[in-house]
Image (tube, grey):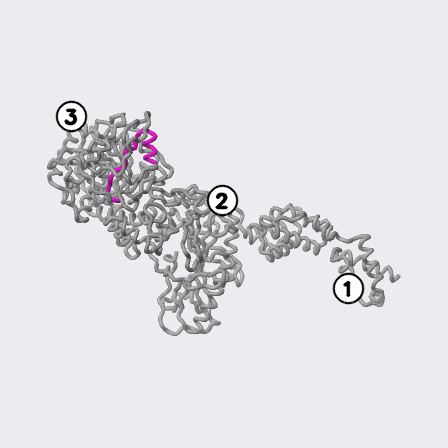
Amino acid sequence: MSALTRTPPASSDSTLATDPSNDEVIIGLEIHCQLDTGTKLFCGCSTDYRDDGPNTHVCPICLGLPGTLPKVNKKAVEYALKVAKALNCEILEESEFARKNYFYPDLNKGYQITQYDRPLAVRGYLDIEGEEGGKRVRITRVHMEEDPGRLVHKGGTDRPKYTLVDYNRAGIPLIEIVTEPDLRSPKEARRFLNKLRATLEYLGVYDSEKEGSLRVDANISIQPKGWFECEGKGKEDRGRAEIKNISSYKGVEKALTFEITRQKNAIRRGQKLECATRHFVETRGVTTASRSKEMEQEYRYFPEPDLRPLKVRSWADEIILPELPDARKVRFIKEYGFSPTHAATVTGDWRVAEFYDNLPKDLATVAATATWVADTLLGELNYRDMTISDVPQGHFIELVTLIRKDTITDKSGVEVLRSLLDQLKESGSCEKPSVCVKRLNLAKTGGEGLDGVISEVLAEQPQAVSDYASGKSEAFNFLIGQVMRKTRGRVDPGELNRVMRETLDSMRT
Amino acid sequence: MASKVCRFDPEDKYNAFLSTIEKAPFESTGKLAGIPVAIKDNISTKGIMTTCGSKILEGYVPPFDAFVVELLKREGAAIVGKTNMDEFGMGTTTENSAFGPTLNPCDTGRVPGGSSGGSAAAVAGGMVPMALGTDTGGSIRCPSAFCGIVGLKPTYGRISRYGLIAYANSLEQIGPMARNVTDVSTLMEVLCACDPRDSTTYDRPFCHAPEVNIRGTRIGVPEEFFGKGVDPKVASVVWDGISLLERLGAEIVTCRMPSMSHALAAYYVTCTSEASSNLARFDGVRYGPTSDTKKQWHESFQEHRRDLFGKEVRRRIMLGTFALSSGYYGKYYAKAQAARQNVKADFARLFRDVDVLAGPTMPTVAFKLGEKSDPLSMYLSDILTVPANLAGVPAISVPCGKAEGMPVGLQIMGRHFEDEKVVDVAYAFEQGVSA
């Protein structure tokens, strides 16, 4: 919606400030998310189109056949209002759909039904962890619109032989969230998006795992510090770029980082940046100048005459929001004794938070489980490019139980986890943790077994034993290391220490 | 009451039909059992070509019925054909059809009016007893007046538009056309039904038998309806009609409607703006004649639209596109909406004092074929019909005599959702004339 973004003040031709240490990055985002309703925004077609053939989830309405009329999906409005409320927005008394007119083959009616001067909600905010502590990112507006269809280029995107149109996606409800230019780094942008994603998923209105469910346009410019806050009309504008259609969370950070380098180089060379539209090429991690002059497009917005205005404020008043990330974080600290860092990690992703919340309470309250989920599990998943949804909860519970019952050590637990995740990644299924423990012979060596290994080591290392007797404490650690090596870490370090010392001391007397 | 036997004479002397169905199926029960009904060609009919009088939809066969067509079938009617019209409803003569003009059965040297000229000619020429038309700025009432039949534009929101191929969504309604008020009333009973697919409808069924007694009804006559441009011969016939209403016991009050001065401009800005958007979907990608897919997209769809839309359609699309452009929106579209509010306010004010308003339907009798070659003079002839569309109020045209041997229509406009009252006054008048 470039038509509504704020126009930069006219710039003069005077020399641009070139002290890069005095510069600041200014970023604003426009986020489009598909609302996870069962049916489309204006007809009854299913939104579950991803595994099906082209043009199988269509009807006269979402094909835009002449004579058809849109009918608003109430669930979509309710979902969008939940988002507006969760983002602390002012909900308008009455909201109205508008037509955005342009010609494109993926556009079934020659216009897109969206919202223009009467969106659902305006002036909200979302609090995030910024580069310098807590930060409030202001939300300009939240509105609803329909997704257009999809073009499928055959024979390469650069010079396709021909192009086909698939209208399965046409009419999927989208929510557009526009921020003020309050973000100051690609990392902050990423953090904002993560928090937003978590919020939308807590609300149950969005599924980030569905391909193509997110599209971000990012506005970015580099200006002298304080430029943005400065109200002077004559202030210089070095120009900015609008990067269109970034379709992943990682992509946003990458695109912005690339764009900063590009703009900084241009500023260093004294070049004036145009206000340009750029495209992010995900595969190459670069942005390229867009050939079309999209910023100059004329969309001829006017109120959609086929739909009545929606009385959204009274509607929103009736909606009760579920627990959101910040509240759950506080609860996890209080209820489960999480450290603030662990709580932030676990509650920062809805699926992880749910995973944890659904663990049996006697397990969940163990502080160790927090570390297990927040550090070990997430780390191992991340390493394998897997998500929490890939983890069978029963298996995880069994694994943690094995550790708690002292059947295996923490260290062995990690080994089991790694083996199970590898199996899952390979084949989508895995053995039970107890089976894995047996197979890898990881059951804890303790009692008589431990005594045996210790005696073995002491017999093999008479030198170290006499060194210990003569008071050399390094010898003790050496002997411990030898037992660990022999048992491949299957012993509890505390127990080993105790038994070893007892054995050595009894030998001295 | 219309004949209960399906008798349809497909010999089309007036080019009233674009397609006919010789052995149309019908039911033997229902309010319209066996009655042949003609449908204007901008109303979707499942399995029957629906072109809107345009080459751009030649060969298009909708896969679904408009809600009104479902309702007609449910009541036993036989859908016998699709009637000619000005392309997409854009015209006042039915000469703007891509498939040739319809002739007026009263004088084949004259136009039947438009844009529902085919429906009016089919009824007036005796081919069918009743038909559906659509009225965006007078398209039911004008041809009804010109051909000497009865036509009603219902209250906006009373009849579902689902399946009506949009020209100007905020103005248009489907409505009945017939040779007498009783048949119009019967059609209203069938057509006014709740349709959840059209968000602009209200659930207001029409359960009413026309009432002949109008004693005590207050009828306002706005001076502006007899202003400049209204043929004195037409004015005189209509005044005679109003006098008849007075003799039937109604009270006649003259009044003013100052918003009329901006009504026509407001109407043309609004309808062309909406049309420019509505007609954007005809790009040759999904239905109708296919555009040249070998060419670049922007070339192919532009050529397609240039070649297949008629001159008047292209003119209105360009006008509407201009009116909605940034920089002109405030000057045109926004101003038109303000003027529209003034028209609504005028009606609301007048209806606090009177029950209905009366005046001529059209400023003249039917034009000679080819007479209105200048689009602006054609637009001006809509001056008396557009106020009802801008305000969304019901308005009927009922035959009230002749001038120069051609029929003249008396227009009666009522309050929102008082279509019944409008029908009653028209019925009393009709009975009074034949008495």
Question: Residue B253 versus residue A170: which sits nearer the camera?
Answer: A170
Q: Using the rendered view, name the quadrant where residue B327 is placed.
A: bottom left
Mark 1 to mark 2: distance in Å?
59 Å
The chain letter under disc 3 is B
Quarter of the picture containing the N terminus of chain B is top left
Indicate the amino acid at tag 1. Asn
Q: Nearer the viewer, mark 2 or mark 3?
A: 3
Question: Residue A258 versus residue A334: which sits nearer the camera?
Answer: A258
**Labels 2 and 3 share a subunit:** no
Magenta region: B67-87
For marks 1 and 2 on the same chain, the one whose residue lies earlier in the sequence: 2
Indicate the amino acid at tag 2. Ile
Find numbered disc 2 in the image and state the secondary structure of the residue it sits on: loop
The chain letter under disc 1 is A
Indicate the amino acid at tag 3. Ala
Q: Which mark is residue A320?
A: 2
Mark 2 surroundings within 10 Å by alpha-carbon count, few (fewer than 14), some (14 through 19), many (20 or more): few
Mark 3 surroundings within 10 Å by alpha-carbon count, few (fewer than 14), some (14 through 19), many (20 or more): few
Q: Position of residue A103 (x, y in %)?
A: 35, 53
Mark 3 to mark 1: distance in Å?
123 Å
Residue beneath disc 3: B435
* Magenta stretch encompasses residue B77: yes
The mark tally for this picture is 3
Find numbered disc 3 in the image and state the secondary structure of the residue it sits on: loop
Q: Position of residue A411 (x, y in %)?
A: 70, 56
Q: Which mark is residue A461?
A: none
Q: Nearer the viewer, mark 1 or mark 2?
A: 1
Callouts 1 and 2 close, C-beta under 8 Å: no
